Amino acid sequence: MENINNSYFDGYYKDIWRNLIPTELTVKETDFMMQYFNLQPGNKVLDIMCGYGRHAIALAKKGINVTAVDNLGEYIAEINETAVKENLSIKATKADIIKYEAEGIFDLALCMGNSLCFFDRSDTIKLLKMIAAHLKPGGHFLINTWMLAEIAFKNFQEKSWSNLSDLKFITESKYLLQPSRIETEHLILVPDGKTETKKAIDYIYSVAEMELMLEEAGFTMKEVYSIPGRKKFTLGEPRAYIVAEKH
């Protein structure tokens, strides 16, 4: 069955997502990657579920060779256009990530912006094993998430609404078990009277469950940060950055 999130980021939400992420956050995350993983010009990075390429483009501007993968063709076209225009070393590919097989060996892999929670345990382990197979020994995998159980339990809201630019964004969520997940209906109201409805499923894993899945796929969980490289994660903080190392 196709993952429901494969169609989540098209339509109005494609641009909503871009506006939700502050530019300065991308700068700080990219600086962390360069320093913490000692990335040098010519190193190779695999950016899984890359979205509109905020990390792929930022890393490529620092001389990193980036392979970027996403399921949304419009995002990939935009990245490729930027890469050609700015002469950046980015290979961007549209693919269903669960069916995707990378080519070559990488120094670092990324899954940022909460994307790993889109998959149930079986698909998550399949994806993790694919990534591990294409990392050099001692290579690293960086995961950014705000759907760990230690985060989601505290921050869960059944209903919420917000204004994003000229759009109204209304959400209704259910916290379900077996497997633990949050299913959310999003209603987007546009000033001209149009509406768009989206459904998302975010699978919820504890830090311990994440560690077990990483171990099964060939990784060791090294650190969990709330602020990359500066502050260790503690219960209830709004986001986490998991650093894993290939055995």
Image (tube, helix red, strand yellow):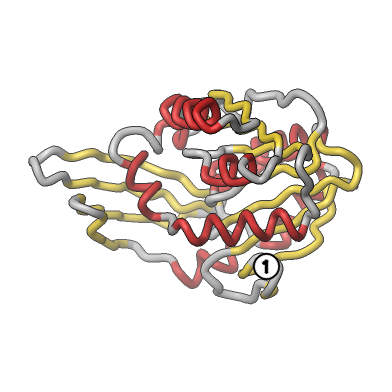
SS type, badge 1? strand
Mark 1 surroundings: few (<14), some (14-19) or many (≥20) residues within 10 A = some
Residue at (82, 45) in percent of width and height: 216
- 151 above or below 137? below
Residue 24: % across, % down: 49, 61
Q: Quadrant of residue 127?
A: top right
Q: Is residue 83 visible?
A: yes
User: Nearest the camera: 208 or 101?
Assistant: 101
Residue 200: % across, % down: 41, 44
- 81 above or below 205? above
- 203 above or below 53? below
User: Nearest the camera: 217 or 23?
Assistant: 23
Residue at (41, 49) in percent of width and height: 183
Residue 161: % across, % down: 25, 60
Q: Quadrant of residue 120?
A: top right
Identify the residue under disc 1.
225
Relative placement, left or right, of 33 versus 182 is right
Residue 222: % across, % down: 81, 61
Q: Is residue 178 visible?
A: no
User: Nearest the camera: 120 or 168?
Assistant: 168
| Amino acid carrying mark 1 in the image | Tyr
Residue at (46, 53) in percent of width and height: 182
User: How many discs appear?
Assistant: 1
Residue at (20, 50) in percent of width and height: 167
Furthest residue in direction left, as rendered: 192
User: Nearest the camera: 106 or 124?
Assistant: 106
